[in-house]
Image (spheres, rainbow, N blue to C red):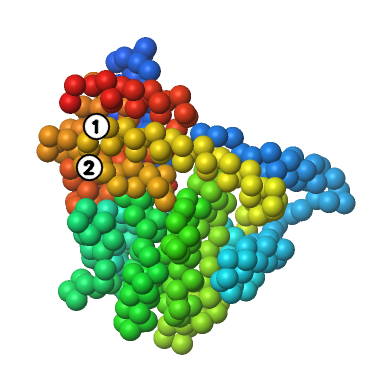
């Protein structure tokens, strides 16, 4: 009889956001007239910007024309688009070559797929609170996971520890769920640590576009020494509303070599074997995000979400709740009132105020007692959630 991957038995029964969806559906079944405010999963609500829509339409027309039709796309990405993304990095002072850019269908796919590059018996360091897929994909792969917890006092920005190590280090900055961002000096410490130990940093830059403070790094490659120890994974999901369209990119520098193996060449080997590339239509739509017009339009959508964040920040301030985030990231991370645990607060908010958020415990044990609000909702629902919270007798 075939043996299944028994590591699946180590996973929680259900993925965090799936559980929230089931609880929401159950509530709506019992209360069909409820007007819920959705601030749970970080899913965008504004449509794709006009420059992207135009490019997508043109690409569809190309596929209808025998002279402009495209079949299989290059597995690592259309060369012109790889160069466009590299040039985008160079415009921010980061020297990246087109061959170091790999086009993907989104960051979440890559965060798990990239584990193919590493020995499954290796170890992973996950600083928490963390996006729950980090733990789940490493569990599925059978890797040894070490958790590095952090708290409000250190602004949820843990630094290298003398006692907790891992070969593969996940860093998400700006952080999901806390909204905290590492500064240059702090990231330099992680880069030095990784180079010293021969580890590799997987830098999740999915929220880089939300950074407002010019002194904060958008990319790990802004840090000296990162080219020999880091892979960066980014996505247009949050930057340009591609959650349902799917597009991302991964940067693997030529200098990233372990045990004589080039990780860049290994990833070319992996992608050319395991994928047939991202569709022509989606790559055309993604390319439009990097044009002057596309960037301006995407930024205008980000400003809308930032105004939602400002509404939630003001709400937290007026209620006197302890919180962080919302400035350089689209999430508000708050301490649950009255020592409530995360799931009790979830149920309380749902039942009393019909607001959906995400329980902090879903991001690791040190998230217990915290709660996350996404600011990707509509203005109407954000304002309504704020109104209900301010009117509530806490
Ligand atoms: C989240 O809510 O944490 C994320 O948006 C989910 C995701 O990116 O897959």
Task: Tell me: 232 left or right of 65.
Answer: left
Task: Tell me: 64 left or right of 169.
Answer: right
Q: Which mark is residue 319?
A: 1
Above-or-below relation of 208 to 352: below
Which corner quadrant of the image does residue 161 belong to?
A: bottom left
User: Image point 70% across, 43% down: which residue?
Assistant: 51
Q: Quadrant of the N terminus?
A: bottom left
Above-or-below relation of 62 to 29: below
Residue 25 showing in the rendered view? no
Please tell me which residue lies in front, 21 or 339.
339
Q: Which mark is residue 271?
A: none
Disc 2 residue lies near ligand 1 with CB under 8 A: no
Q: Which mark is residue 322?
A: 2
Q: Mark 2 and mark 1: span between their CA atoms?
A: 9 Å
Query: x and y percent of residue 323 in the render?
Result: 26, 44
Query: x and y percent of residue 226 in the render?
Result: 45, 76
User: Image point 21% across, 53% down: which residue?
Assistant: 152
User: Image point 34% across, 55% down: which residue?
Assistant: 180
Q: Quadrant of the C terminus?
A: top left
Query: x and y percent of residue 236 in the render?
Result: 55, 50
Ligand 1 position by quadrant:
top left
User: Is disc 1 placed on a helix, strand or loop?
Assistant: helix
Residue at the far top: name it: 33
Above-or-below relation of 315 to 173: above
User: Is disc 2 placed on a helix, strand or loop?
Assistant: loop
């Amino acid at each position: 009889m075939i043996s299944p991957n028994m590591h699946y038995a180590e996973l929680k029964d259900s993925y965090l956001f799936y559980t929230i969806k089931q609880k929401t559906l159950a509530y709506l079944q019992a209360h069909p007239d409820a007007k819920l405010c959705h601030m749970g999963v970080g899913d965008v609500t504004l449509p794709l910007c006009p420059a992207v829509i135009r490019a997508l339409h043109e690409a569809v027309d190309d596929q209808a024309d025998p002279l402009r039709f495209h079949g299989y796309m290059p597995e690592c990405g259309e060369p012109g688009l790889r160069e466009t993304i590299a040039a985008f990095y160079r415009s921010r002072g980061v020297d990246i070559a087109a061959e170091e850019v790999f086009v993907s269908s989104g960051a979440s796919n890559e965060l798990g797929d990239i584990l193919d590059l590493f020995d499954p018996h290796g170890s992973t360091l996950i600083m928490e609170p963390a996006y729950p897929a980090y733990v789940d994909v490493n569990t599925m792969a059978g890797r040894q996971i070490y958790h590095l917890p952090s708290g409000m006092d250190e602004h949820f920005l843990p630094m290298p520890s003398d006692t907790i190590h891992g070969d593969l280090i996940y860093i998400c900055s700006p952080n999901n769920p806390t909204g905290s961002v590492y500064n240059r000096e702090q990231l330099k410490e992680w880069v030095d640590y990784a180079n010293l130990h021969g580890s590799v940093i997987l830098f999740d830059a999915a929220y880089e576009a939300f950074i407002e403070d010019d002194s904060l790094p958008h990319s790990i490659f802004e840090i000296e020494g990162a080219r020999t120890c880091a892979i960066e994974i980014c996505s247009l999901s949050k930057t340009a509303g591609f959650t349902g369209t799917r597009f991302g990119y991964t940067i693997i520098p030529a200098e990233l070599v372990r045990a004589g193996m080039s990780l860049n060449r290994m990833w070319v080997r992996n992608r050319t074997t395991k994928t047939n590339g991202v569709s022509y239509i989606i790559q055309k739509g993604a390319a439009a995000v990097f044009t002057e017009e596309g960037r301006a339009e995407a930024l205008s959508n980000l400003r809308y979400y930032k105004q939602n964040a400002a509404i939630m920040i003001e709400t937290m301030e007026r209620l006197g709740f302890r919180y962080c985030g919302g400035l350089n990231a689209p999430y508000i991370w708050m301490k649950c009132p009255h020592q409530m645990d995360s799931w009790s607060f979830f149920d309380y908010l749902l039942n009393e105020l019909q607001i959906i958020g995400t329980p902090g415990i879903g991001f690791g044990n040190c998230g217990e007692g915290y709660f996350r609000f996404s600011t990707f909702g509509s203005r109407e629902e954000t304002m309504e959630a704020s109104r209900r919270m301010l009117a509530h007798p806490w």
